[in-house]
Image (tube, rainbow, N blue to C red):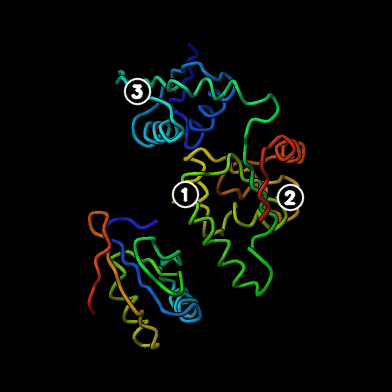
Amino acid sequence: MKTIDCRNMACPQPVVLVKRALEENPGESLTVLVDSGAPRENVTRFATNRGFLVAETPMGVGFSLVVSGKAGSIEIAETVAPGAKGKTVMLVGSDRLGDGPEELGRLLMKNFMITLLDINELPDSIFFINTGVLLTTEGSEIAEVLEKLENMGCEILSCGVCLDFFHRKDKLAAGSVTNMFTIAEGMLKAQSVIRL
Amino acid sequence: MVQDGDYVAVFNSIHRVMKAEKILKQKKLAIMLIPVPRALQSDCGLAIRYDSALRNEVERVLAEEGFLPAELYVKQHGEYVKVTT
């Protein structure tokens, strides 16, 4: 059984690593070492929301979480054709939702992201490009919301070129930086792409 | 988005809620425009959330400007309780 040590890591890094490990080793159990508090809660919530069982044991420092698949989930993983992993990705190409007055568009986008917090079916990744990166950087009213989404297992990725263009490379407030290769590959490999 | 103890002010028009947000932000009050929580009904779909510590100031400013909300709720033990003003 694979063990990953997420102690001394800042959120959302533990959730990101657990997600990756579960995807890379479908059907295998995983031991995760986490600090108490937010990392422990976030990893547990992420795994149980996705149908995994979590057994935790307190340690001297932090907790050991054993994440294992429910009966049946392993079969599902095996029947999905290679390449079509059933991922959903969302492409946010603007800081506004829909055409029309800028003020309304920005308000609708903010509203949409907050509403995602209450929905169980989240996309696997959200890519932010062009003025979309204004949502993930300092000054964004929803940086905290995006961070919560990331803690729920939804990757928040901003286009590096776009951050550079808007002089916001060192002002990322939620998620991480990505490149066009990852964005293009993510969209082509996904089962569904939702473009906002 | 809404914690226990937070206030949620519901307005009956999108224009009113946007104006109210603008007025409160000009006064540097830490409020947030949020979707109306599912448990509450509203025609407009937007509400303003604020901390209980800001309640007096927020409501004083809104009253002065003639932008008091249609309804006000406070979250207590996970439930929205209507506040009669």
Instruction: Check disc 2 and report its element: helix, strand or loop.
Output: helix
**Residue A180's quadrant in the figure?**
top right
Amino acid bearing label 3: Phe
Foreground: disc 1 or disc 3: 1
Q: Earlier in the sequence, mark 3 or mark 2?
A: 3
Q: Which residue is at a point 72% across and 55% down the rendered structure image?
A: A130
Amino acid bearing label 1: Ile
Answer left or right for A151 relative to B6: right
**Residue at image mark 1:** A119
Answer left or right for A177 relative to B18: right
Q: Earlier in the sequence, mark 1 or mark 3?
A: 3
Q: Nearer the viewer, residue B32 or A30?
A: A30
Answer left or right for A63 relative to A115: left
**Residue at image mark 3:** A63
- Residue A164 marker: 2
Foreground: disc 3 or disc 2: 3
Q: Nearer the viewer, residue A143 or A182?
A: A182
Q: CA distance from mark 2 to mark 1?
A: 32 Å
Position in image of residue A30 (x %, y %): 46, 18
Q: CA distance from mark 3 to mark 2?
A: 39 Å
Instruction: Check disc 3 and report its element: helix, strand or loop.
Output: strand
Amino acid bearing label 2: Asp
